[in-house]
Image (cartoon, rainbow, N blue to C red):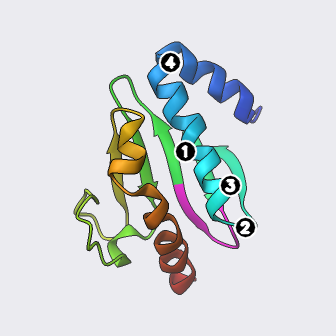
Amino acid sequence: MTTKTIQALLDDIRLLGEEQHSLVTLFRELVKDSISPVSEEVKYGGIIFSSGEQFCGVFAYKKHVSVEFSQGAKITDTLGYLEGKGKGRRHIKLYSIEDIKIKHLAEYLPLSLVAAKTNA
C-alpha cells in the first residue's frame, strides 16, 4: 500500500475546487504558525496534525472543508462554532476563506491540543 503524499492530496483537493484548496492551504499555514512543534500526515483522506498527540485534521469535501478536532468534546466552546454530538470529536465547517477568521480557528487550535494531551 502506497501512502499518499501531502502534495498529492493537495493536488486532488485542487480538483474539487480552488476554494477548497485555498482553505486547506491557509489552514495548514495557520496550524504551523500556531503550534510548534507540529507534524502532519495524510490519513483518513485528509491531513492530520500532531504535536505529541493527534489534535486535529482537515478534510476537503465538494461543498466545504471540515476541520476536525480529535478531542473536541472536551473543549469549552465559548465561541459556539463547534459542531457535532459524538463522544469525542467536534468539527467546524468552512465554506469560505473568511470563515477561518470569522470562526476563530486560531483560538481553537491550542484548545484542541490541550484537550488531546489531557486524553493521553
The amino acid at mark 3 is: Lys
Give the numbered dot on residue 37: none
- Residue at disc 4, secondary structure: helix
Nearest to N terminus: mark 1 or mark 4: 4
Which residue sits at x=77%, y=32%?
Answer: 2
The amino acid at mark 4 is: Glu
In the picture of the structure, the residue carrying the numbered disc 3 is 32
Rendered view: 115 above or below 3? below
Q: Residues within 10 Å of mark 3 (few under 14, many from 20)?
A: some
Residue 6 as seen in the image, left or right of residue 12:
right
In the picture of the structure, the residue carrying the numbered disc 1 is 27
Which residue sits at x=61%, y=45%?
Answer: 28
Q: CA distance from mark 2 to mark 3?
A: 7 Å
In the picture of the structure, the residue carrying the numbered disc 4 is 18
Q: Which residues are magenta?
A: 50-56
Rendered view: 9 above or below 111? above
Do tag 3 and tag 4 residues touch (Cβ < 8 Å)?
no
Q: CA distance from mark 1 to mark 4?
A: 14 Å
